[in-house]
Amino acid sequence: VAMRETEGGNIYGDFIYRADLIAEKLAQIEERSPLVVEEYQAKLQERLTNLLADNNIKVEPERLLQEVAIFADRTSITEEIVRLKSHIKQFKAIIATDQPVGRKLDFLIQEFNREANTIASKANDYTMAQIVVEIKAEIEKIREQIQNIE
């Protein structure tokens, strides 16, 4: 019994560590997200200016803003970030209980993966994609540990 309690304490500590690590990486993504839209706007402006300059046509600012708005909407990851933050809070609350939590955690970790995958598919940015890979690696480590608990 003492060994199981010690092992449980170690697993608990590992869960907290990894959940906090995921939250830190998620904050990096959240910080980077608006910059991706700004970079897209600058690149689009430059491309259009270069393409249209040959024919003496100027870029219409309204049209450019419309395209950037469409891009921003399509790549918005705000919902996924909010949900993943919520899942992290739920995860910490569940592991703090004295009840069997294995199945709940198994389901919740699937939700972690779902949100991470959606962020990756919408990211449209190499740096953010790298951070998502790191998040997914931590999620996988948690998932493996969940298999060892009741």
Image: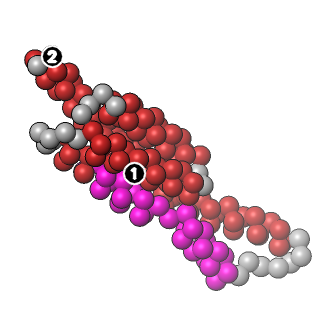
| Screen quadrant of the C terminus | top left
How much space separates mark 1 and mark 2, taking CA atoms? 31 Å
List x then y, in percent, for residue 29: 44, 51
| Residue at 36% over, 58% down | 83
Q: Which residues are magenta?
A: 62-89
Q: How is the image coloured?
A: secondary structure
Between residue 60 and residue 74, name the one nearer to us. 74
Q: In the figure, is residue 101 to the left or right of 122?
A: left
Question: 10 Å neighbourhood of mark 2: few (<14), some, or many (≥20)?
Answer: few
Q: The residue tagged with tag 1: helix, strand or loop?
A: helix
What residue is rendered at 21% in x and 32% in y?
A: 12
Residue drawn where x is 41% and y is 64% of the image: 79
Q: Give the numbered dot on residue 111.
A: 1
Question: In the picture shown, does residue 4 fall above or below 119?
Answer: above
Q: Which residue is mark 2?
A: 3
- Relative to residue 27, is residue 41 depicted above or below? below
Left/right of residue 65 with respect to residue 88 in the rendered view: right
